[in-house]
Image (cartoon, rainbow, N blue to C red):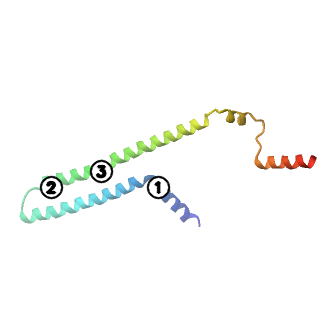
Amino acid sequence: MFGFALKSTFIYMVWNKFKKQIITAIISLIGIVIVFAIYEDINNIFIQKQIDYIFELVATKWFLVCLIIGFNIFSFKKAIKENKKYEDQDNSSIENTLTTNTPQHKEILNKKKLKTKSDVILQRYLNKMEN
């Protein structure tokens, strides 16, 4: 029953966190498919005209594919470094907010018993009943 909701939530969380990387990977795959299609077309033309540029053609194809893959690896590493940097900043900002020692914070921390709103209302009601 909850399988669809869990899967949808997981996909949504992954999409929000890695949206840029997913789009880059999809565009790169499309780029690689285009490179292979262009290679096939040019290869067929060279075969029909009996021109021998196969080595240059294959080298160009694999250079372009390696260039696309290298760009993806570079962008993924950059994204991982940025995520770590943001996580470190978040952790340090949380630690800074936890370690602030204003007089008001010290007063609250030194109380023997912290009262909730309902405790305060009950205490007022009991005080009125006694009077």
Tag 1: amino acid: Asn
Q: CA distance from mark 2 to mark 3?
A: 19 Å
Mark 1 neighbour class, 10 Å CA radius: few under 14, some 14 to 19, many 20 or more: few
Q: Secondary structure at mark 3?
A: helix
* Mark found first going from the N terminus, 2 or 3: 2
Q: CA distance from mark 2 to mark 1?
A: 40 Å
* Mark found first going from the N terminus, 1 or 3: 1
Q: Is residue 126 above or below residue 113?
A: below
Left or right of residue 23: residue 10: right
Left or right of residue 123: residue 106: left
State the image quarter where residue 52 is shown: bottom left
Q: Position of residue 77 (x, y in %)?
A: 37, 44
Q: Secondary structure at mark 1?
A: helix
Q: CA distance from mark 1 to mark 3?
A: 23 Å
- Is residue 127 or residue 75 the one in the foreground? 127
Tag 2: amino acid: Leu
Residue indicated by mark 3? 69
Residue indicated by mark 1? 16
State the image quarter where residue 4 is shown: bottom right
Q: Secondary structure at mark 2?
A: helix
The answer to whether mark 2 and mark 1 are in CB contact below 8 A is no
Q: Position of residue 88 (x, y in %)?
A: 49, 39
Q: Which label was assigned to residue 57?
A: 2
Tag 3: amino acid: Ile
The answer to whether mark 2 and mark 3 are in CB contact below 8 A is no
